[in-house]
Amino acid sequence: MAELDPLIHAPARLQVVTTLSAVSEAEFAALRAALEVSDSVLSKHVSALADAGYVRSRKGVRAGRRTTWISLTSAGREALREHVAALRRLIDVVD
Amino acid sequence: MEDRVQHNPDDPRSVLAGADQARQRLAAGLRLPTGLHPALAAAVAVQVGTAAYGIATQTAAGLAVALAGVAVSLGVAALTLYQFRRINGVRVYGLASQIVLGAGATSSLAYLGAFGAATWAAFESRWWLVAAAAVAGGVGYAFGALRWWHAYQHDPAAHAGGASPRVLAALAVLACLGLVALLVAS
């Protein structure tokens, strides 16, 4: 049975991985705008998630300037699926 | 991380709602390049029409015309996907699959139906019917892409997946080689 994942249990982290599940790859700035957070906050979350293998980041170029592209890995997608399932079970128990 | 609606971090329902809201915010903010659907319809119509002509004429000139049609179609697809990435700062493989492969049922049926009808019409030298079938196929293909886009905006996580750019490039090469083989063999 799926359990809560401590790495994405914090609402901010859950929002990062959930938002990434809507796309195949997102530029750092686009993700920051969607989440309405600062560069430093998003960097911190992305680093933690990358260390766990939940997201992958790579350097690229867009409109002539360097940028970072971030994507959810298959491990991250699976972790998100299990975490959401665990949250829904908690909701069912409360209901 | 601030949401437009305050979420209680201790309430699972509120946490899930906040995450879904962030995902929907990203998806709702995505914009398709201007004129995508007419351009896609025209490119597919050109590809279907030229392929039908090439297959029916079975000449080197016909092969060149058919390959030029494929090049136009792939060029429009590549330009469209580049513009989408530049405008939005994201890649969505599901969209790429819709545009390049016509992965949805509507696009696939429209393309195959139009291709079959146009090829038959070309063998019968009914060129007005080739053109009509090609245009109908292009419009149906673009309509399929539009339907997919609405489905994606409604549930982005379920529709974001698709073939990666490398797979699409490999399939494009295979399609060109297949077309050449078909024309050489016929």
Image (spheres, coloured by chain):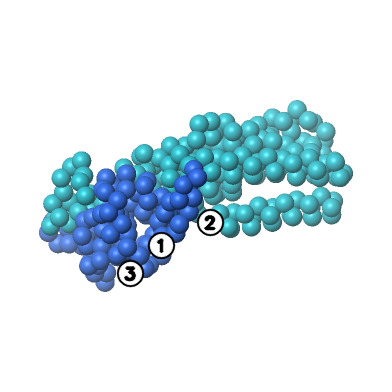
Chain colours: A blue, B cyan
Disc 3 crowd rating (10 Å Cα; few below 14, some 14-19, many 20+) is few
Q: Residue at 31% across / 57% down in the picture?
A: A43
Disc 2 crowd rating (10 Å Cα; few below 14, some 14-19, many 20+) is some
Q: Residue at 27% across / 45% down in the picture?
A: A36
Amino acid on which the number 3 mark rests in the picture? Ala
Q: Nearer the viewer, mark 2 or mark 1?
A: 1
**Alpha carbons under labels 2 and 1: distance apart:** 15 Å
**Disc number placed over residue A52 in the picture, else none:** 3
x, y percent for residue B16: 23, 53
Q: Chain of mark 3?
A: A
Whether the residues at callouts 3 and 1 have beta carbons within 8 Å, the answer is: no
Residue found at the far bottom of this picture: A1
Instruction: State whether residue A46 appears in this view.
Output: yes
B160 left or right of B44?
left
**Disc number placed over residue A56 in the picture, else none:** 1
Whether the residues at callouts 2 and 3 have beta carbons within 8 Å, the answer is: no
x, y percent for residue A29: 36, 47
Q: Chain of mark 1?
A: A
Amino acid on which the number 1 mark rests in the picture? Arg
x, y percent for residue B152: 41, 44
Q: Residue at 59% across / 54% down in the picture?
A: B168
Q: Is residue B53 above or below residue B12?
A: above
**Disc number placed over residue B164 in the picture, else none:** 2
B139 left or right of B89?
right
**Alpha carbons under labels 2 and 3: distance apart:** 24 Å
Amino acid on which the number 2 mark rests in the picture? Ser
Which of these two is toward me, B91 or B49?
Answer: B91
The kind of secondary structure element at disc 1 is strand
